[in-house]
Image (tube, grey):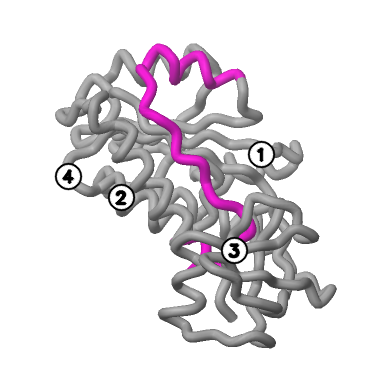
Amino acid sequence: MQRYFIETAIAEARISGEDARHIERVMRMKEGDKIVVVAQNTAHICEISAFEGDEVHVQTTGEIVPSPELPVHVTVACGLPKGDKLELITQKATELGMFALLPFEAERSIVKWDKKKGAKKQERLQKIAKEAAEQSHRTHIPEIYEPISFKQLVEQVGNFDAVFIADEEDAKAKQRTRFAEKLKNVYDKKSKSILIIFGPEGGIARKEADALLQAGAQTMSLGPRILRAETAPLYALSAISYEFE
């Protein structure tokens, strides 16, 4: 069943814009057809009642679809990577349950955020997140934030119940504390929010890792292999899903 997000309450459900055109012209739906409408993080089974201009009117059937969301809010902070890797991370991390994406300007980031084109880039990433949320039947569209400085990232550490950083040096160590063990501690404390931090190509610089550790973050071991910038967040989200779900 097709899924669409709206910003209003379900009692005022009207679908417009690209979603309305998709319903009418691509899916060729008719009055009486059923769709899933997500309003205020709740998925409702609705019936199309009318097509009026560029809007599709729907009425709820009273049925609620169970939420597939992770029981903990996981924000992914990643150093700005090259090419379209940020788009890949946005799409796949949304499918894996990411709550929000927080890009940051890392010391080893080769790419610099273009302020002039930034709004359009952010809008595109938000659209990718929305489409991925619909595809994976989520009830929450991850917020894609504008990139922040590393200093601002450090200041964010205290806003989360648990903060982990993917440190390449941890992967090289002979003795590592398994990420699963650290996640069990988070689970036992009934933490509600987790921030997982990843560097760009080349990883997090030593002084950046030290600053984050001093702010209260802890390292997470993602195994003995060195993962790419776009792979590590997906690995970590998968591990969190396995532990919490």
Pointer 4 residue: 83
Image quadrant in which you'd find residue 226: top left
Tell which circle, 3 or 2, labels the residue nearer the N-terminal end: 3
Pointer 3 residue: 15
**Which residue is depicted at the point 18% across and 40% down?**
82
Q: CA distance from mark 1 to mark 2?
A: 29 Å
Q: Which residues are magenta?
A: 132-158
Pointer 1 residue: 186
Q: Nearer the viewer, mark 1 or mark 4?
A: 4
89 within the magenta span: no
**Which residue is depicted at the point 39% across and 56% down?**
91
Circle 2 Cα neighbour tier, 10 Å, few/some/many (<14 / 14–19 / ≥20): some
Task: In the rendered structure, find residue 87 and report the number of the disc placed on it.
Answer: 2
Q: Is residue 100 above or below residue 213?
A: below
Depth check, front residue: 28 or 115: 28
Residue 88 placed where, x, y %? 31, 54
Q: Secondary structure at mark 4?
A: loop
Residue 241 placed where, x, y %? 57, 57
The amino acid at mark 4 is: Gly
**Does the CB distance between marks 2 and 4 fall below 8 Å?**
no
Q: CA distance from mark 1 to mark 4?
A: 34 Å
For the question of whether residue 197 can be seen, the reply is no
Relative horizontal placement of residue 119, taking residue 27 as reference (left or right): left
The amino acid at mark 2 is: Glu
151 within the magenta span: yes
Q: Quadrant of the N terminus?
A: bottom right
Q: Secondary structure at mark 1?
A: helix
Q: Quadrant of the C terminus?
A: bottom right
Q: CA distance from mark 1 to mark 3?
A: 39 Å
Q: Nearer the viewer, mark 1 or mark 3?
A: 3
